[in-house]
Image: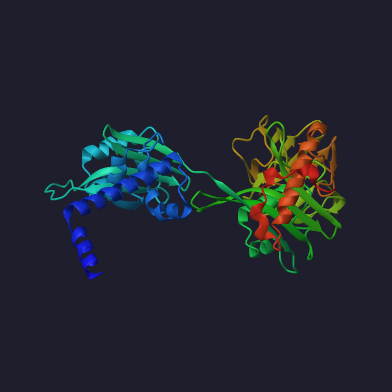
Amino acid sequence: MNKVHQKIKKYISKPHFQVFMVSFSMCLLFFFIISKQSGSNIPPRIQAAFDPIISMENDVSKNLNGKPNSINNLLENMFSNTKEHTIEIKNGDSVASLLSDLGICYSEILEVSKSIAPLCELSDLRPGSDKLVVRLKPIENSDSKVKAELKELEIIKSPIYKVVSLKTKDGFKTIEKKSNVNVELVRGEGVIDKGTSLTQVATANNIPYNVIDKFYEVFSFDVDFERDIYPGDRFQIMYEQLYSDNGEYLGNGEVIFASLYLNSRHEELRLFRYENEKGVVGYYDENGKGASKTLKKTPINGARISSKFSNNRKHPILGYSRAHKGVDFAAPSGTPIPAAGDGKVVFRGWKNGYGNYIKIRHNGTYSTAYAHLSKFKSDVKVGTQVKQGQTVGYVGNTGLSTGPHLHYEIIKNGVHVNPLTIKLPSIQNLTKSEIAKFETARDKINIQFAVLDKNFSQFAHLIDINKIDASSIIK
């Protein structure tokens, strides 16, 4: 047995055997790379063993058309001494200077800048946001300031968008790279406790501020969050969270579903996000009735009511009783005043005790008025068409007023009505022909929301909302 070992050891030490083993290893490597590209069925265990090598067939091993480069290019990238530098752009940084500091020659910097220019100007990179990834090959024994050859420059504009310039034999070639945005649905809920607000409870339950704002917005036509919310009221919400392909959190998407139970009304309000046949997105109740109304009852969210609508109120300055034809909302001077609905400005100016005053006609039935403004929005004049939510002026203390506030009026068919109690018509109601499509979308959303319940959340990833057959749902 010792003689056999000695013969094997002697044979292995011979040069021709070592050359054979190196050649065999290279051939085996080529085989698996080519097999990977052609979709060959390699046994799982063998495939797993070679995955670390094959995984290098990525951006580096593909040309700018998305096709695999030659084996020589692949090996060059695998075994070269290319160095990588990641640079965060800061105020005052010059990209040309940053590249020059890495030892890259001016002619290459100029060439790569020209290649990138149609997609991205190097001088326009945003400090604190954009960053560079520079891949270069050091030049050995260089006596000049040029210490490296630029091989690739990557400008990362966001987690899902970057511009890449790769050096080829024909010069630098530049492309855009966009990754997918992956959507994950998240469920949130809470109960209002004594001494807390809906915002406080939602925040304590890790619901983001912009999602809370959207929740307020979609219910703002039916709910006065300053006066209609009481302890024991509860809310539920389902919204999107967005991630890049590599799992980086990008922010929040749309609110898909929202529910609010009001004990004072013994009523649950449920709203579903839906895009109609014309591509217009809105929120609808379970019957397809639009959440948006012609007007908002309270144009300034969260403002305290300092005086209600009344047919007989003692005027705080004049001292005698007369009708108070609107609602006063106390707010700091300068608070923006949004238009309660789409319409046309028919009056803008000074009006006796009202001070600075704006009146908007919304349609043949409704008009609204805003009084005691500190100033008007400069681009809002008589004849201007305004959109719901557009700022028309700012809270002030002009005219007969004891403090900064908005006096808000709704006029229906020429008669002043109480903004807090009037029942306003919905807009964006669905047609009869579209109700069936909405009901299908509604039922899918209900199923997805139920699956996200904490008792079943581990199964949520198994549900594809787009493949749910809503017609099979038990009513």
Q: How many marks?
A: 0
Please state, as top left, top right, bottom left or bottom right, where the N terminus lies in the image.
bottom left
Residue 281 relative to residue 151: left or right: right
Q: Position of residue 361 (x, y in %)?
A: 75, 34
- Residue reaching furthest to the left: 143
Q: Which residue appears at 21% of the width and 59% of the height?
A: 12
Task: State the residue at coordinates (73%, 39%).
Answer: 341
What percent of the width, then of the height, locates residue 392? 65, 40
Residue drawn where x is 34% and y is 52% of the image: 86
Depicted 168 relative to depicted 30: above or below: above
| Residue 20 picture location, percent across and down | 24, 50
Q: Choose top left, top right, bottom left or bottom right for residue 346.
A: top right
For residue 186, say whether it is visible: no
4 w.r.t. 420: above or below: below
Q: Nearer the viewer, residue 462 or 245?
A: 462
The reply, left or right, for residue 146 in relation to residue 48 is: left
Question: Picture quarter containing residue 121?
Answer: top left
Q: Quick check: 321 left or right of 123?
A: right
